[in-house]
């Protein structure tokens, strides 16, 4: 098979998952859970899994802790999927006891329970299967089965391979949704690998995804609140240097990822956006590929988990993108000092090792 050499390490786990689907799960109720404010990669993975399960007569529902983000809502609407799945998608903002009614959970695109919002303290009460492409996090310790590939650039890539191996096929709209998830997480192939392109080839050639449609549904005009958030983030930038690297810090109350991308485009090598959400703080980090190459530091593997520990929470993500959620007191100056000292220590240590 064309993709064989790239996902050989996950082949047995995917086979085990499919065997479980065919033999153990029929007649049971499954809840598929994404991280809160589900992005297109998360929602595509969840819906595609729902479709695969439905083909073998397994009842499943998708739980969205705190809903979808705006771009996911747009993608669903433009692909004509919003109405079709309105009875299968539960936007969970209260009523966590709903998990009592399920036999097993499938958690997608999430590596730490803190990312599950309202469900963070409830998921460990049920057996769960984890399907994810992030660096290992706390959920890994309790999962009954893990389908993971942190070299994949999106969870949609992993779910595409599950669909291909199952031989069950997918409706064209769902294949296109998966493709939009890949495009979203790779920033339209900026972070793609050879493996990504091979997966996309199979998604189009074998599962009928519409590439032009997947591109078009992601195009959107930024809302006025998002534009204002970007401008506020730019206005509040604190700039620091480590060797020749420019590190930027800022704070906003929403659209953190969008603000981080904007500041990278302004010229920062890495950026960290701090925000407060009720009793918790959130740090969204983004870095250029050149930052990873120069420092050897992965935000998701190295920096964000370390910061999570320092701040009384957890962190994770990818090499160039990561998030920390913690219960520390909100104090912007104190937080950026902690982040900067930790980053500086890692970079200087990495430089010494290179010598």
Image: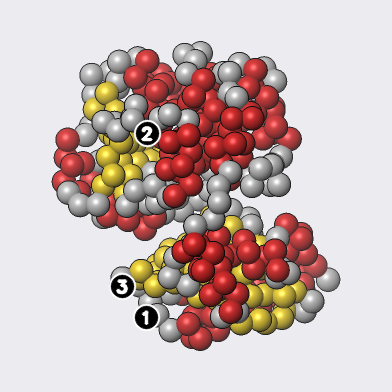
Mark 2 secondary-structure assignment: loop
- The answer, for residue 296, to whether it is visible in the render is no
Mark 2 vs mark 1: in front: 2
Indicate which disc, 3 or 2, sits on the residue closer to the N terminus: 2
In the drawing, does residue 256 fall left or right of residue 99? right
In the rendered image, residue 262, in percent from the top left (x then y), is placed at 63, 64
State how far apart marks 3 and 2 are (Cα).
32 Å
* Viewer-nearest residue: 78 or 9: 78
Quadrant showing the N terminus: top right
Q: Label 3: which residue?
A: 279
Quadrant showing the C terminus: bottom right
Mark 3 secondary-structure assignment: loop
Q: How is the image coloured?
A: secondary structure
Q: Quadrant of residue 211?
A: top right
State how far apart marks 1 and 3 are (Cα).
8 Å
Looking at the image, which residue is at 29% across and 20% down?
58
In the rendered image, residue 125, in percent from the top left (x then y), is placed at 23, 45
* Viewer-nearest residue: 141 or 252: 252
Q: Which mark is residue 171?
A: none
Mark 3 vs mark 2: in front: 2
State how far apart marks 2 and 1 are (Cα).
39 Å
Q: Quadrant of residue 184?
A: top right
Graded by Cα atoms within 10 Å as few (under 14), some (14 to 19) or many (20 or more), the crowding at tag 2 reads some
Indicate which disc, 1 or 3, sits on the residue closer to the N terminus: 3
* Image height of 238 relative to 326, above or below: below
Q: Which mark is residue 82?
A: 2
Q: Which mark is residue 329?
A: 1
In the rendered image, residue 337, in percent from the top left (x then y), is placed at 55, 84
* Image height of 284 relative to 54, above or below: below
Indicate which disc, 2 or 1, sits on the residue closer to the N terminus: 2
């Amino acid at each position: 098979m064309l993709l064989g050499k790239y996902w050989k390490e996950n082949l047995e786990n995917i086979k085990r998952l499919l065997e479980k689907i065919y033999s153990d799960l029929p007649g049971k109720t499954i809840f598929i859970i994404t991280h809160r404010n589900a992005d297109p990669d998360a929602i595509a993975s969840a819906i595609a899994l729902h479709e695969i399960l439905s083909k073998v007569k397994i009842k499943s529902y998708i739980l969205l802790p705190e809903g979808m983000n705006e771009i996911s809502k747009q993608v669903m609407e433009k692909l004509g999927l919003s109405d079709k799945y309105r009875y299968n998608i539960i936007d969970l903002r209260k009523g966590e006891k709903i998990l009592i009614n399920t036999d097993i959970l499938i958690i997608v695109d999430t590596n730490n329970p803190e990312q599950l919002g309202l469900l963070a303290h409830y998921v460990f009460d049920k057996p769960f299967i984890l399907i994810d492409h992030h660096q290992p996090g706390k959920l890994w310790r309790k999962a009954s089965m893990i389908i993971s590939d942190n070299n994949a650039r999106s969870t949609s890539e992993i779910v595409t391979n599950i669909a291909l191996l199952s031989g069950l096929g997918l409706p064209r709209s769902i294949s296109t949704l998966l493709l939009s998830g890949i495009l979203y997480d790779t920033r339209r192939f900026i972070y793609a690998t050879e493996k990504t392109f091979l997966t996309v080839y199979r998604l189009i050639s074998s599962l009928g995804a519409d590439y032009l449609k997947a591109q078009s549904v992601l195009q959107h005009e930024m809302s006025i609140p998002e534009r204002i958030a970007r401008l506020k983030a730019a206005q509040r930038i604190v700039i620091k240097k480590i060797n020749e690297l420019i590190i930027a810090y800022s704070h906003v109350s929403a659209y953190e990822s969008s603000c981080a991308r904007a500041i990278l485009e302004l010229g920062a090598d890495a950026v960290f956006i701090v925000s407060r959400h009720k009793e918790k703080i959130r740090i969204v980090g983004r870095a250029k590929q050149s930052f990873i190459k120069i420092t050897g530091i992965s935000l998701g593997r190295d920096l964000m988990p370390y910061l999570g520990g320092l701040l009384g929470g957890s962190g994770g993500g990818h090499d160039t993108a990561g998030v920390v959620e913690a219960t520390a007191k909100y104090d912007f100056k104190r937080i950026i000092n902690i982040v900067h000292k930790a980053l500086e220590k890692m970079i200087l240590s990495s430089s010494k090792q290179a010598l």
